[in-house]
Amino acid sequence: MRLIHTCGCSPSAAHSTGLAIESEGKELLLGEPPPWTEDKIKVFPVTWKSPVTGALHFQVHPCAAQELLIDPLFEGALREGALYPDGAHITDLKEVRDLLYKMQRPAMAVGKEKDLALFHNRGVLHTVVGASKPDQVRAFHQCNLAASDEPVRPTPEDVRQCA
Protein backbone atom coordinates (compact mmCIF):
# COMPACT_ATOMS: atom_id res chain seq x y z
CA MET A 1 0.00 0.00 0.00
CA ARG A 2 1.31 3.43 -0.90
CA LEU A 3 -0.16 6.86 -0.39
CA ILE A 4 -0.16 9.92 -2.55
CA HIS A 5 0.42 13.06 -0.53
CA THR A 6 -0.56 16.59 -1.39
CA CYS A 7 -1.58 19.00 1.32
CA GLY A 8 -4.89 20.70 0.76
CA CYS A 9 -6.47 20.46 4.17
CA SER A 10 -5.84 23.86 5.79
CA PRO A 11 -9.50 25.00 6.20
CA SER A 12 -10.57 21.55 7.41
CA ALA A 13 -11.37 20.68 11.03
CA ALA A 14 -9.33 18.18 13.01
CA HIS A 15 -10.84 14.93 14.30
CA SER A 16 -11.59 15.04 18.03
CA THR A 17 -8.47 12.94 18.72
CA GLY A 18 -6.27 15.26 16.67
CA LEU A 19 -5.15 12.23 14.69
CA ALA A 20 -7.08 12.88 11.50
CA ILE A 21 -8.90 15.51 9.49
CA GLU A 22 -12.70 15.42 9.23
CA SER A 23 -13.93 14.91 5.67
CA GLU A 24 -16.43 17.76 5.47
CA GLY A 25 -15.83 18.93 1.91
CA LYS A 26 -13.77 21.91 3.14
CA GLU A 27 -10.52 20.69 1.60
CA LEU A 28 -8.83 22.87 -0.97
CA LEU A 29 -9.12 21.48 -4.48
CA LEU A 30 -6.01 20.85 -6.56
CA GLY A 31 -5.19 24.09 -8.30
CA GLU A 32 -6.51 26.26 -5.47
CA PRO A 33 -3.93 28.13 -3.40
CA PRO A 34 -1.26 27.32 -2.45
CA PRO A 35 0.23 26.65 -5.88
CA TRP A 36 1.63 23.18 -6.46
CA THR A 37 3.42 21.24 -9.17
CA GLU A 38 3.42 17.53 -10.06
CA ASP A 39 7.06 17.16 -8.99
CA LYS A 40 6.07 18.08 -5.40
CA ILE A 41 3.62 15.17 -5.06
CA LYS A 42 5.11 12.42 -2.90
CA VAL A 43 4.23 8.73 -3.04
CA PHE A 44 5.33 6.95 0.15
CA PRO A 45 5.00 3.39 1.38
CA VAL A 46 2.79 3.02 4.44
CA THR A 47 5.12 0.28 5.66
CA TRP A 48 8.68 1.46 6.07
CA LYS A 49 11.89 -0.31 7.01
CA SER A 50 14.03 0.83 9.93
CA PRO A 51 17.50 1.56 8.54
CA VAL A 52 18.92 0.60 11.95
CA THR A 53 17.15 -2.68 12.78
CA GLY A 54 15.74 -3.74 9.40
CA ALA A 55 12.32 -4.21 11.07
CA LEU A 56 9.18 -3.13 9.23
CA HIS A 57 6.88 -0.49 10.71
CA PHE A 58 3.41 0.68 9.68
CA GLN A 59 2.57 4.32 10.19
CA VAL A 60 1.05 7.05 8.08
CA HIS A 61 -0.81 10.15 9.17
CA PRO A 62 -4.33 10.19 7.68
CA CYS A 63 -4.18 13.99 7.38
CA ALA A 64 -1.46 13.78 4.75
CA ALA A 65 -3.00 11.16 2.48
CA GLN A 66 -5.00 11.99 -0.61
CA GLU A 67 -5.06 8.65 -2.44
CA LEU A 68 -4.09 5.05 -1.69
CA LEU A 69 -2.38 2.78 -4.19
CA ILE A 70 -2.75 -0.81 -2.97
CA ASP A 71 -0.62 -3.48 -4.60
CA PRO A 72 -2.26 -6.86 -5.28
CA LEU A 73 -1.34 -9.73 -2.98
CA PHE A 74 1.61 -11.75 -4.19
CA GLU A 75 1.09 -15.24 -5.60
CA GLY A 76 0.41 -17.76 -2.86
CA ALA A 77 -0.70 -15.17 -0.29
CA LEU A 78 -3.82 -15.88 1.78
CA ARG A 79 -6.65 -13.98 0.07
CA GLU A 80 -9.44 -14.84 2.51
CA GLY A 81 -10.40 -11.79 4.58
CA ALA A 82 -8.17 -9.42 2.58
CA LEU A 83 -9.85 -6.09 1.83
CA TYR A 84 -8.22 -5.60 -1.58
CA PRO A 85 -6.62 -8.90 -2.67
CA ASP A 86 -6.39 -7.72 -6.30
CA GLY A 87 -5.08 -4.29 -5.37
CA ALA A 88 -6.91 -0.98 -5.60
CA HIS A 89 -6.56 2.73 -6.24
CA ILE A 90 -8.71 4.55 -3.69
CA THR A 91 -9.34 8.19 -4.53
CA ASP A 92 -12.35 8.98 -2.33
CA LEU A 93 -10.77 11.21 0.34
CA LYS A 94 -13.14 10.18 3.13
CA GLU A 95 -12.56 6.48 2.39
CA VAL A 96 -8.77 7.02 2.35
CA ARG A 97 -8.79 8.85 5.68
CA ASP A 98 -11.23 6.46 7.36
CA LEU A 99 -9.27 3.38 6.29
CA LEU A 100 -5.92 4.75 7.48
CA TYR A 101 -7.39 5.94 10.77
CA LYS A 102 -9.10 2.60 11.51
CA MET A 103 -5.94 0.65 10.72
CA GLN A 104 -3.92 2.58 13.30
CA ARG A 105 -6.28 3.13 16.24
CA PRO A 106 -6.06 2.47 19.05
CA ALA A 107 -2.30 2.09 19.31
CA MET A 108 -2.35 3.19 22.93
CA ALA A 109 -5.17 3.04 25.44
CA VAL A 110 -6.57 6.29 26.72
CA GLY A 111 -4.69 7.18 29.87
CA LYS A 112 -5.70 8.93 33.01
CA GLU A 113 -4.53 12.16 34.59
CA LYS A 114 -0.82 12.21 35.53
CA ASP A 115 0.01 9.17 33.37
CA LEU A 116 3.33 9.35 31.53
CA ALA A 117 3.42 8.10 27.95
CA LEU A 118 6.70 7.51 26.14
CA PHE A 119 6.70 6.54 22.47
CA HIS A 120 8.79 6.53 19.33
CA ASN A 121 7.97 9.82 17.61
CA ARG A 122 8.31 8.51 14.05
CA GLY A 123 6.81 5.13 14.86
CA VAL A 124 3.51 5.92 16.58
CA LEU A 125 0.69 8.05 15.24
CA HIS A 126 0.18 10.82 17.76
CA THR A 127 -0.95 14.39 18.13
CA VAL A 128 0.16 17.45 20.03
CA VAL A 129 -1.10 17.59 23.59
CA GLY A 130 -1.39 20.66 25.68
CA ALA A 131 -3.55 22.94 27.70
CA SER A 132 -6.98 23.59 26.25
CA LYS A 133 -8.30 25.62 29.19
CA PRO A 134 -6.77 28.69 30.90
CA ASP A 135 -6.28 26.87 34.22
CA GLN A 136 -4.45 23.90 32.65
CA VAL A 137 -0.68 23.59 32.41
CA ARG A 138 0.94 22.13 29.33
CA ALA A 139 3.20 19.40 30.59
CA PHE A 140 4.53 17.93 27.39
CA HIS A 141 8.14 17.75 26.38
CA GLN A 142 9.29 16.35 23.09
CA CYS A 143 12.65 15.14 21.91
CA ASN A 144 12.40 15.12 18.15
CA LEU A 145 15.12 14.14 15.74
CA ALA A 146 13.04 14.40 12.58
CA ALA A 147 14.96 13.81 9.40
CA SER A 148 14.79 15.10 5.87
CA ASP A 149 15.24 11.62 4.43
CA GLU A 150 12.35 9.63 3.00
CA PRO A 151 11.25 6.32 4.56
CA VAL A 152 13.14 3.22 3.43
CA ARG A 153 10.78 1.09 1.36
CA PRO A 154 10.33 -2.60 2.17
CA THR A 155 11.63 -5.11 -0.35
CA PRO A 156 9.32 -7.74 -1.89
CA GLU A 157 11.00 -10.31 0.39
CA ASP A 158 10.18 -8.15 3.45
CA VAL A 159 6.52 -8.11 2.40
CA ARG A 160 6.43 -11.90 1.90
CA GLN A 161 7.88 -12.49 5.37
CA CYS A 162 5.17 -10.35 6.98
CA ALA A 163 2.24 -11.77 5.03
Image (spheres, rainbow, N blue to C red):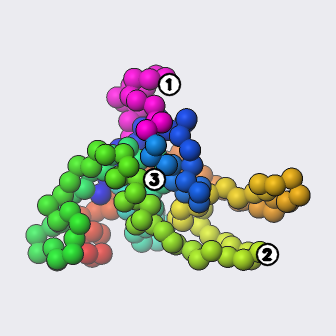
Q: Earlier in the sequence, mark 3 or mark 1?
A: 1
Marks 3/1: CA distance? 20 Å
Residue 58 lies, with reference to residue 149, above or below; the image says below
Where residue 23 appears, as percent x and y from the top left, is: 44, 46
Q: Residue at x 41, y 47 (%)?
A: 65
Quadrant (top left/top right/bottom left/bottom right) for the N terminus: bottom left
Q: Are marks 3 and 2 in contact (CB under 8 Å)?
A: no
What secondary structure characterizes most of the magenta part?
loop
The three-letter code of the residue at mark 1 reads: Pro
Magenta stretch contains residue 91: no
Residue interval drawn in magenta = 25-43
- What secondary structure is found at the residue carrying circle 1? loop
Task: Please tell me in which quadrant of the rendered image residue 131 appears.
Answer: bottom right
Q: Earlier in the sequence, mark 2 or mark 1?
A: 1
Residue 47 lies, with reference to residue 110, above or below; the image says above
Mark 3 nearby-residue class (10 Å; few <14, some 14–19, many ≥20) = many
Marks 2/1: CA distance? 41 Å
Q: Which residue is mark 1?
A: 34
Tell me if I can see residue 35 in this picture. yes
Which residue occupies the extreme front position in the image?
A: 24
Q: Which residue is mark 3?
A: 62
Mark 2 nearby-residue class (10 Å; few <14, some 14–19, many ≥20) = few
Q: Earlier in the sequence, mark 3 or mark 2?
A: 3
Q: Residue at x 37, y 59 (%)?
A: 99
Q: Which residue is mark 2?
A: 114
